[in-house]
Image (cartoon, helix red, strand yellow):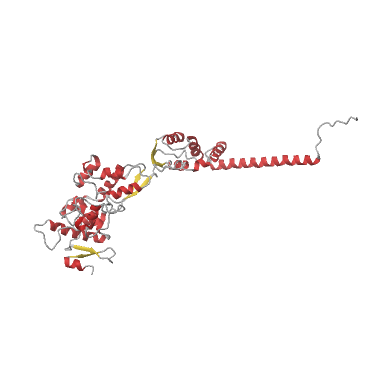
Amino acid sequence: MKNLPVKEGLEVSGSSRVSLRALILSGLFLGGVLCLAFVGIAFAAAASTPHLNPLESLVLRLRLTLRSAELNRPLSADESVVCFNVARGSDAYSIAQQLAAQGFALDPDLFRTYVRYFNIDSRLQAGTFSLRRSLSLPQIAQRLTDANADTIVFRVLEGWRIEEIAAAIDRTRGLTFTGADFLALVGAGAGSQAGEIGAFAARVGVPIGRSLEGFLFPDTYILPACGTAQDLVTRLLANFDARITPPMRAAALANGLTFYEAITLASIVQREAIFDDERPRIAGVYLNRLFNSRRTPPNPNIPTTLDADPTVQYALGNTRDPETWWARLTREDYRSVQSPYNTYLYQGLPPTPICSPGLASIAAALYPEQTDYVYFRACPESGGRHTFSRTLAEHARACN
C-alpha cells in the first residue's frame, strides 16, 4: 500500500475566500451603520437636551425609550382627585416618592428620569395641586410646573336655588368638595354659624334658622386647586357685598321693606322676568299688591296676594319631576299646594328668597317702577314679554 502525502494546513478555495471577504466587509459596513446611527442618536439627544452632557442625555433617552409604554398610559382607572402639596425646596425624587406614598402608581426613578431629561425638574413648583389619579406620568409632571394655573372655573347662574348650585358642584370636575358640603354651610341655620358666614347673615338680616338662599351672588368664580366649600361660600358672599352697595341697601328701607324682604322680592322678579327692562315694572306690581295687603282696610280693587307662580314652584321643589326644581304648574296647584311659599294662598312675601337673583333683579326690587298696574301676564305669542293691566277686566282682555 502506497503512503499518501499529508497536506499541512487547510487549503481554501478561491470562491470561499471571496465569500469570507464579502462577509467581513458586510459586517464592517453594518457595524459602521450602527455606529453612525448610535452617534446620530447621541447627537440628536444632546441637541434636544442642552442642559445635559451627551452621555447622560443618551442614557436617559434610552431608559425612557425602553419604558415608553409605561410612560404614556394612565396611572389608574380611578377618576378621583387628590390634593397634592409640594413643599418649598422639594426635589424631583422626593416629589415622586410623595406621589407614590399618596397612592399614585408610578416609579419614582422613572419620574426623576423623565423630568431630568426634559428639564422639567428645574420648573417644578411648590404649592397645592389637584391631581386626578388617572393622569399619566408626563401629565402629572407638567401639572406640577404651574401652581397658579391649577384653578377651576365655577359658574352660578341667575335664578338658581341653593340645591341647583349644589348639583353644579357635584358636576364640576376637579372640585374636592361636594354639594352636600356646600349645603351644610348655606342651608337652614346658616345664620347661627360662627365666623364670617354668621356675621354676613346677621349683617343682611337673615332670620335665625333660615338659609342663605338669595345671597349667593350669581357670577363666574375662579376657585383654587383643592379649595373647600368654605372657600366658595366666602367668594359668593364677598361678591354680594361688593356688588350691593350701602346706598342700594338703604333704598330698601325707603321703599318700606327690610333688606331681607327686598332680596326676597328680587328673587321672585328673577324667576318671573325674561327681559331686564320689565323687571322694575314687575317689581312695582308686586309692591302695589304687597302694600295693599298691609292696608286696613285693603283696596278691594287691588289683589292682596302676590299670585307669583315661581313661589309655588319653589314649594314643590323637585317632588313632581326629579329632573327640575322648577316644575310646570297646573291651575289646581294654586289652591292645592299647601305651603307658606304659595303666594296664591298666603298674603305677603314668602318666608325666604326663592333663588339667587342677579343684579338687574335686585336693582328692580330696590328701585321699582312707580305705576298703578296690579296685574301682568305673558301672552302665548309675546316671546316672554308681559302685558300689564290696572284692572281685572283689562287683565282678562290682555291676550285676546
Q: Residue drawn at (72%, 40%), measured in percent from left and top? A: 23
Dividing the picture into quadrants, the one containing residue 203 is top left
* Outermost right residue: 1
Looking at the image, is 307 positioned above or below residue 38?
Answer: below
Q: In which quarter of the image is the C terminus?
A: bottom left
Taking the image as drawn, is residue 128 in sight? no
Residue 46 image position (x, y, % from top left): 56, 40
Q: Residue drawn at (47%, 35%), measured in percent from left and top? A: 108
Residue 238 image position (x, y, % from top left): 27, 46
In the picture, measured across the screen, residue 235 lies left or right of residue 146, that is left
Along the viewing direction, whichever of 240 and 357 lies nearer the viewer: 357
Q: Quadrant of the N terminus?
A: top right
Along the viewing direction, whichever of 34 and 351 lies nearer the viewer: 351
Looking at the image, is 158 positioned above or below residue 388?
Answer: above
Residue 102 image position (x, y, % from top left): 41, 36
Dividing the picture into quadrants, the one containing residue 229 is top left
In the picture, measured across the screen, residue 41 lies left or right of residue 2, that is left
Looking at the image, is 196 positioned above or below residue 370?
Answer: above
In the picture, measured across the screen, residue 41 lies left or right of residue 89, that is right
Residue 170 image position (x, y, % from top left): 34, 46
Taking the image as drawn, is residue 37 in sight? yes
Q: Residue drawn at (79%, 42%), measured in percent from left and top? A: 15
Number of numbered discs overlaid on the protein picture: 0
